[in-house]
Image: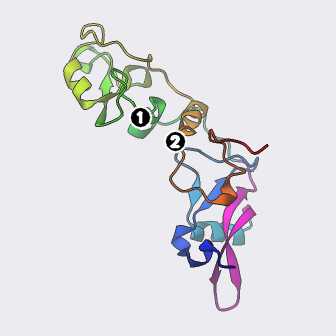
Amino acid sequence: MFHPDLIRHPDGCPTLVLNADYTPLSYYPLSLWPWQTAVKAMFLDRVDVVAHYEREVHSASISLKLPSVIALKQFVKPSQFPAFTRFNLFLRDRFACQYCGHGRDLTFDHVVPRAQGGRTTWENVVTACAPCNLRKGGRTPKQAAMPLHIEPIRPTNWHLQEHGRSFPPNYLHETWHDWLYWDVELDA
């Protein structure tokens, strides 16, 4: 029987990376390695292969099924707090403007404007759409009569991972489903 993996280019065979406790290293972005990195880690005995694609790669002396899911042999302790980046800020705020709730034309806004002494910190920056950011201008939300949906906080990595589960990627190989937990209906 013909399997779709057999015609897939190796570059289209990313490997889901699990920590040593068999949980994904991250959900958003999903912890994926290119097939070359996964194969190298296999040969260096740094990972256990959990599942394979049907797709094979060949050298002069061996044929190898590409790994679709691997688990690290050594546990990687995730840091407690994520870096303050635009992407992480948008993820914390679920890719929605904290003034109107829309998810298009996103930028970030200082709750207390820098001109009024506000700093660029997790607790003072929120996701905002360009129209709301322009409307608020150099005022506080109270001065602009634009209340925030949620007060900004410094998130933990767990917090961002939970938010990331709301945004499953476009591609999920069938061998990954047992290791990922998005809001999907479970088999009885």
Where 35 sits versus 128, above or below?
Answer: below
Report the front residue among 77 and 15.
15
Taking the spot 75% from the left edge, 50% from the top edge, the residue there is 20
Image location of residue 45, percent across then percent down: 74, 67
Report the front residue among 135 and 84.
135
73 horizontally vs 68: left or right: right
Q: Secondary structure at mark 2?
A: loop
Does residue 137 appear in the picture of this structure?
Answer: no
Q: Which mark is drawn over residue 95?
A: 1
Of the 4 image quadrants, the one containing the N terminus is bottom right
64 horizontally vs 12: left or right: right
Residue at the bottom extreme, as displayed: 60
**Which residues, given as a range, are shown in magenta?**
46-75
Q: Which mark is drawn over residue 167?
A: 2
Marks 1 and 2, how far apart in space?
Answer: 10 Å
Q: Are marks 1 and 2 in contact (CB under 8 Å)?
A: yes
Taking the spot 24% from the left edge, 31% from the top edge, the residue there is 130
> Was residue 50 drawn as part of the magenta stretch in this picture?
yes
Of the 4 image quadrants, the one containing the C terminus is top right
10 Å crowding of disc 1: few (<14), some (14-19), many (20+): many
- The number of discs equals 2
Comes first in the chain, label 1 or label 2: 1
Where, by quadrant of the figure, is residue 143 drawn?
top left
Residue type marked 2: Phe
| Secondary structure mostly taken by the magenta-highlighted segment of the chain | strand
Image location of residue 44, percent across then percent down: 70, 69
Where 13 sits versus 99, above or below?
Answer: below
Residue type marked 1: Phe
Does residue 120 appear in the picture of this structure?
Answer: yes
Where, by quadrant of the figure, is residue 96 drawn?
top left
